[in-house]
Image (cartoon, rainbow, N blue to C red):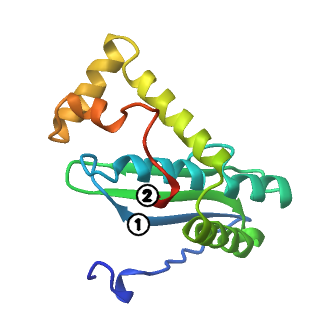
Amino acid sequence: DREGSEDSKRVILIPRPGSDSRILLLDRAPPRGHDDHLPFSMLNRILGGMFSSKVNMILREEYGNTYGVHGVYDAHSEDGEIEIVLNLASKNVGLALRTIVEQMTRLHDDGPTEEELEMARALELGRLYESIDGSHDTSETLAELFTSGLEPSHLEKQHSAPCFPVDWKQL
């Protein structure tokens, strides 16, 4: 399928026995070295990559969905992907899809709330500190940078003070 064409957007339904379903929304995203890497990582957190994401809170608190929403931004050297994944009762699939689309539209039109943006920044900063906490974590982080074709200085470039210069218009 051609990227961006209507043919490249598809829904695949796989019937499975039982009362639970899994939703996986997947799209292309920037590679690790791209200037939009950090904004996409924060967008991922706001959509589902943190427990307090709006989609997770609506589905859990307002509709009683007992499973969590998970956001994943997987960036490689040449490309990346962003995912929203959730497991839920089959009867709630339509509600979940509506909620996700509503929240994506809200983020597109209005941007995240200041609280969402600050929480995403704090989680990104925590992830950075965790990635260089001790020799084992530091060596893994440096290996990831190397395999992505990036220099160690990339960490400083991406996470420069004051705590990530990312505003909602970049998301």
Pointer 1 residue: 27
Q: Residue at x 64, y 48 (%)?
A: 114
Drawn side of residue 162 relative to residue 157, left or right: right
- Upstream in the sequence, badge 2 or badge 1? 1
Amino acid type, callout 2: Gln
The nearer-to-camera label among 2 and 1 is 2
Q: Secondary structure at mark 2?
A: helix
Which residue is outermost to the top?
A: 134
Which residue is outermost to the bottom?
A: 6
Rounded to the nearest angstrom, the CA distance separating label 2 from label 1 is: 17 Å
Q: Secondary structure at mark 1?
A: strand
Which residue is outermost to the front?
A: 162
Q: Residue at x 33, y 80 (%)?
A: 4
On the image, which quarter does residue 88 sit in? bottom right
| Mark carried by residue 116 | none
Q: Is residue 149 above or below residue 162?
A: below
Drawn side of residue 139 relative to residue 116, left or right: left
Residue 78 position, x and y percent, is 20, 54
- Crowd class of label 2 (few under 14; some 14 to 19; many from 20; radius 10 Å): few
Using the rendered image of the protein, determine whether residue 44 is visible from the camera's viewpoint: yes
Residue 142 position, x and y percent, is 24, 26
Q: Residue at x 74, y 65 (%)?
A: 19
Pointer 2 residue: 170
